[in-house]
Image (spheres, grey):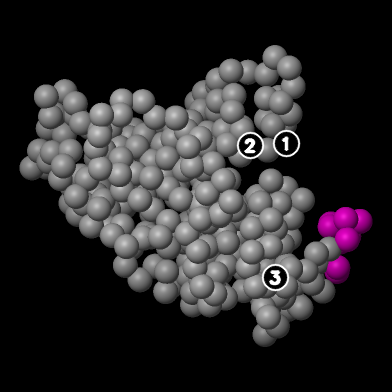
Amino acid sequence: MKSVFIDGEAGTTGLGIRQRLELVPVEVRSIAPEHRKDPAARKSLMAEADLVILCLPDAAAAEAVGLADSLGHDAPRILDASSAHRTAAGWTYGFAELAEGQAARIAAAQRVSNPGCYATGAIALLRPLTEAGLIPPDHPVTINAVSGYSGGGRQMIEAHEREGGPAFELYALGLDHKHVPEIELHGGLTRRPIFVPSVGHFAQGMLVSIPLHLDALPGCPTGADLLHALQRHYAGSAHVRVVAPDETTRLAPDTLDGTDLMELRVYGGGSGRQAVLVARLDNLGKGASGAAVQNLRLMLGLNEESTYG
């Protein structure tokens, strides 16, 4: 049985991974709470593990990689859930549905970076359309998103769980959110997108939306053209569903809570000259812990499962 060490398992993502691993045939090695910041103790566990999952702040994740590398030939494979290596050379991006052959690249990789939650939704919508030539790489793209507060760390969780917590907030209004570089790179863009994230007064769930003027795109594609490109890209996917249009004009962000699934939709309007692309996912599922376990299964050669909970 393969062994896994979660470095930083006390955080939200780490706890979610640990819970999901109860359903996976692996041995999870844990560090005593008093040794969580002890490099020697962590290095010892790394040496015993087949795979180390990093659920740490960026700087600490970079230090942990250095600690693992110091083991030389005994260094374990690493899956990093921080944003430290999502655009770094030598790392494989852990979005298995990104492109043909990506799952195989993850399975063979020594170093895999787990995608960001917002980035997962944005890239899932953009990459098939840039690859198909429906959205030019230099097109001015705007991305709007709302997430449950569970993905914002301890301070945000505490702020929302106490009485009188905020109902809704925009943030990262300096337009420098840490997910932007990975969205640009892995979304197939050459022009930096505008990304406006927000958090609502609900624990889990996420909506990512991208508005488009279709008559500003080459060939003036229709909403149906965009939908068909998404359907072709994700045909047969166990984790990503492209949902055909219906009469729905409202979407709640929390419908997929407790699963590792993502839904993609295309809404049309404006006499066919406008469209809105929408991704819905659980920010702690396909947006974090669920994606990590999907990557773990690929890296360790285990059968893939499509849902959790």
SS of the residue at dot 3? strand
Q: Residue at x 42, y 63 (%)?
A: 96
Vertical arrangement, residue 74 with respect to residue 234, above or below: below
Disc nearer the start of the sequence (1/3): 3
- Quadrant, the N terminus: bottom right
Q: State how far apart marks 3 and 2 are (Cα).
A: 25 Å
SS of the residue at dot 1? helix
Pointer 1 local density, CA inside 10 Å: few below 14, some 14–19, many at least 20:
few
Total numbered circles: 3
On whether residue 283 falls in the magenta region, the answer is no
**Left or right placement of residue 64 versus residue 82 in this view:** right
Q: Which mark is residue 247?
A: none
Q: State how far apart marks 1 and 3 are (Cα).
A: 25 Å
Main SS of the magenta segment? helix
Disc nearer the start of the sequence (3/2): 3
The region drawn magenta spans 32-41
Q: Nearer the viewer, residue 205 or 132?
A: 205
Q: Residue at x 20, y 31 (%)?
A: 268
Pointer 3 local density, CA inside 10 Å: few below 14, some 14–19, many at least 20:
many
- The residue identified by callout 2 is 150
The location of residue 16, given as percent across then percent down, is: 66, 51
The location of residue 54, given as percent across then percent down, is: 67, 59
- The residue identified by callout 1 is 154
**Left or right placement of residue 8 versus residue 225 in this view:** right
Viewer-nearest of labels 1 and 3? 3
Are the two marked residues, 1 and 3, in contact with CB atoms closer than 8 angstroms?
Answer: no
Quadrant location of residue 193? top left
SS of the residue at dot 2? helix
Quadrant location of residue 233? bottom left
- The residue identified by callout 3 is 4
